[in-house]
Amino acid sequence: MQNPHAPQPVLPLFQVLACGAAIVTMSMGIRHGFGLWLQPITQAHDWTRQIYGLAMAIQNISWGLAGVFVGMVADRFGAFRVLIAGGLLYAIGLIGMAYADAPWQLMLTTGVTLGIAQAGTTYAVVYGVIGRNVPAERRSWAMGVAAAAGSFGQFLMVPIEGGLIESLGWQNALVALAAMALVILPLARGLREPVFGVGAAPPREQSIVQALMEAFRYPSFQLLMAGYFVCGFQVVFIGVHMPSYLKDQGLSPQVASYALALVGLFNVFGTYISGALGQRMPKRLILSFIYFARAIVIAVFISVPLSPTSVYIFSAVMGLLWLSTIPATNATIAQIFGVAHLSMLGGFVFLSHQIGSFLGVWLGGYLYDTTGSYDVAWYLAIALGVFAGLVNLPIKEAAITRSPDLSTAH
């Protein structure tokens, strides 16, 4: 009989970070370039931008919904199985995106399939492995490293995707990306945890239902979800619609590619700094600063004359703030609730993020089609940034105190 107090075998730190970072680099790197396909796909099929925006919105909400259940599976059976399934779905979804001839096919492939694939190959799953295998005193830093890898993926992959579109055409470029996504499968072996050797989860003091009841009754968990909603709205609206916004203003497509690459490059530093600072100062203050700063940066960007220089400055500064919410948010969840259900609880918070993403990407297309500009969407992004900065301030980060029956917490 397994001794619940016996030390559990863990994976080497370098192996966890190297394989986890490489998986996130590939998965997030591919995803960050999807804005480059908005105009080629809509022009090839004579679709409106709202159709593509809706497909991306479905992708984000599918990612969020699937992330909850994927997190449960990863917490119970380990990340390895989830990553294998996610990598295969990623390749299938990209090929389906290339050959979708009707809007419903685009919704099914680009929306549902790729959304589920991203749930199984990104932060919630990888952070569960980090939480179980990295000591608490280094956990925020390690999560920052993994988030920085996702940012490096954007810097690395977006120019590659732009080059593939230019050299192969948009359809063949998606097929090439499908082949590249399969690299996730061998990398997943590096995150195969010994403690899940025969499919048995390590001992846990709470059931799934108890963990969920505890979290959703806790005000700080609700505030984290509210802030993450705003994060999703802002970054997905900008990531998907900024290339078209810049082209509408007369700037070349290369400016958009370089801009998204700069976001990724500077977010390597932003996410790492966020993770490192999370070991030294309250993470709620880090999160509030990020959201307030985003609101200011967006307001300045839409107020000054648009030029390649202003775009690059905006992209660099926004890059410092881009995914830097991720390590601070997930480390806060682990600090409050522990790591036994980290992938699942992170999945629920991320679902809120993806609801925001759904609204950001869909409203961006809808408001453009109805008003002829993105102005209202930019104003919403500013207002929501102020809201998120405020709601993160009262979060309590201390570990939760559980009663003996685990049904209540203080």
Image (cartoon, helix red, strand yellow):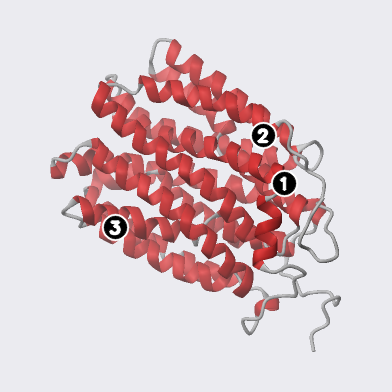
Circle 2 Cα neighbour tier, 10 Å, few/some/many (<14 / 14–19 / ≥20): many
> Alpha carbon of mark 1 to alpha carbon of mark 2: how far?
10 Å
Residue at image mark 1: 332
Between residue 222 and residue 358, name the one nearer to us: 222
Residue at image mark 2: 287
**Picture coordinates of residue 72, whole percent (x, y):** 58, 66
Tell me if I can see residue 28 in this picture: yes
Q: Which mark is residue 113?
A: none
The residue shown at (63%, 28%) is: 389
**Picture coordinates of residue 289, whole percent (x, y):** 67, 27
Q: Amino acid at mark 3?
A: Leu
Query: In the visual, does 26 lie left or right of 387?
Result: left
**Picture coordinates of residue 13, whole percent (x, y):** 72, 62
Query: In the visual, does 32 lie left or right of 275?
Result: left
Circle 3 Cα neighbour tier, 10 Å, few/some/many (<14 / 14–19 / ≥20): some
Q: Which mark is residue 108?
A: 3
Q: Tell me the element at label 1.
A: helix
Circle 1 Cα neighbour tier, 10 Å, few/some/many (<14 / 14–19 / ≥20): many
Whether the residues at callouts 1 and 3 have beta carbons within 8 Å, the answer is: no
Among numbered discs 1 and 2, the one appearing first in the sequence: 2
The residue shown at (57%, 63%) is: 71
The residue shown at (71%, 42%) is: 220
> Alpha carbon of mark 1 to alpha carbon of mark 3: how far?
34 Å
Query: In the visual, does 336 lie left or right of 359?
Result: right
**Relative to 260, does residue 114 appear above or below in the rendering?**
below
Among numbered discs 1 and 3, the one appearing first in the sequence: 3
Location of residue 362 by image quarter = top left
Q: Tell me the element at label 2.
A: helix
Location of residue 247 by image quarter = top left
Between residue 345 and residue 265, name the one nearer to us: 345
